[in-house]
Amino acid sequence: MTLRLSIPWRDGRAPVLQRRHGGGQSKVGTGAVAGGFRAPVKARRREQEAGLKRANFGDGPGLPTLLLLPQLLILLFFFFIPSLRALMQSVLLSDPFGTNVQFVWFDNFKMLFASSEYRQSIAVTFWFTVAQNVLTLGSALVLAFATDRIVRGRSIYRTIILLPYAIAPAIAGILWAFLFNPAVGPLAQVLHGFGIAWDPNLNPTDALILVTLAASWKHICYDYIFLVVGLLAVPVSLMEAAAVDGAGPIRRFVSIALPMLGPTIFFLTVMNFIYGFFETFAIIDAVTKGGPAGATNILVYKVFVDGFVNLDLGSSAAQSVLLMSFALICTLLQFRYFDRKVNYGV
């Protein structure tokens, strides 16, 4: 029995594949070798085995540039130009109307580091960011573990947890400010019933705790999404083997699932720091407005107050440059010291 397979070829020749059941022999026409048939097949096979995908956008750069143009324009107008403008403004001293501008080199930066108010803002920002990072990530881990243990109603459980993600930061701040209002807040009344003199309007510690809780509650959903997806990637066979060996649910989560979530936890730690540095302005403005006595005046809010309220444009620009530098340094330190401890293998 002979099978013939004709494949169209570039030079018009068709390689012939002959197979005989008896002898187990196969022949490929010489036109296939001469036309370069085997080499492309092997190359495509190697690419398929390596999981590579080839995208063809044409010979010229026109289509790739057109596809990247919207994102490049957004970066240009909303990041690069404002960053360059802030860097230029940070070495200038000008009046609120910009009529008198003087080049002062690094005097704005020197005045900032000599200011006790700015140093206090740095300390408040550091403790606020670390506290909300730990609280957000810890709560999201607990909720993700609980979701993984639920059998019935898991989708409803996830939906309820994800609801705060749809709330604007300012609305979340107003909600928490009402709940812990010392006069009419229901949770504040509960604290008063236990003998706790709760008053975030007068007590700096209470105010810092309140904005930390509000910021963490708003951001738990973000961490929760990534952790739930990470738990789905944990091999079920390992969990079942640990269960057969007698390990309980908490032991399996701590010893097996948690190490495999290392890359996800590291990514979320970096993102939580960025969130604490830049994206908590609306919560601070809605809850405490930086008070009392600067107890919640984090760096991003101080940039706004000095620039748009006090109209000190040079100092505000210098603070924005320093804020970006602090965020970059924290991110690099995390990659430098924590990324080596993360296991990316399965």
Image: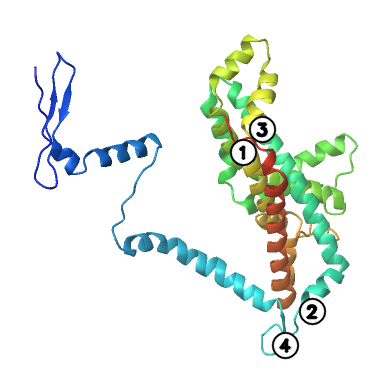
Mark found first going from the N terminus, 3 or 1 = 3
The reply to whether dot 3 and dot 1 touch (C-beta < 8 Å) is no
- Crowdedness near tag 3: few (<14), some (14–19) or many (≥20) residues, C-alpha within 10 Å: some
Q: Are marks 3 and 2 in contact (CB under 8 Å)?
A: no
Q: Which residue is mark 1?
A: 263
* Kind of residue indicated by mark 3: Leu
Amino acid found under the numbered disc labelled 2: Asp
Q: Is residue 271 left or right of residue 69?
A: right
Circle 2 — which element? helix
Determine whether, in the image, residue 2 is placed left or right of residue 62.
left
Q: Earlier in the sequence, mark 4 or mark 3?
A: 4
Q: Verify CB contact (< 8 Å) between mark 4 and mark 1.
A: no
Check disc 3 and report the residue beneath it. 141
Which residue is more in the foreground, 332 or 223? 332
Q: Which residue is mark 4?
A: 102
Mark 1: amino acid: Pro
Residue at 57 percent of width and 38 percent of height? 226
User: Residue lying furthest bottom in this view?
Assistant: 100
Q: CA distance from mark 4 to mark 3?
A: 52 Å
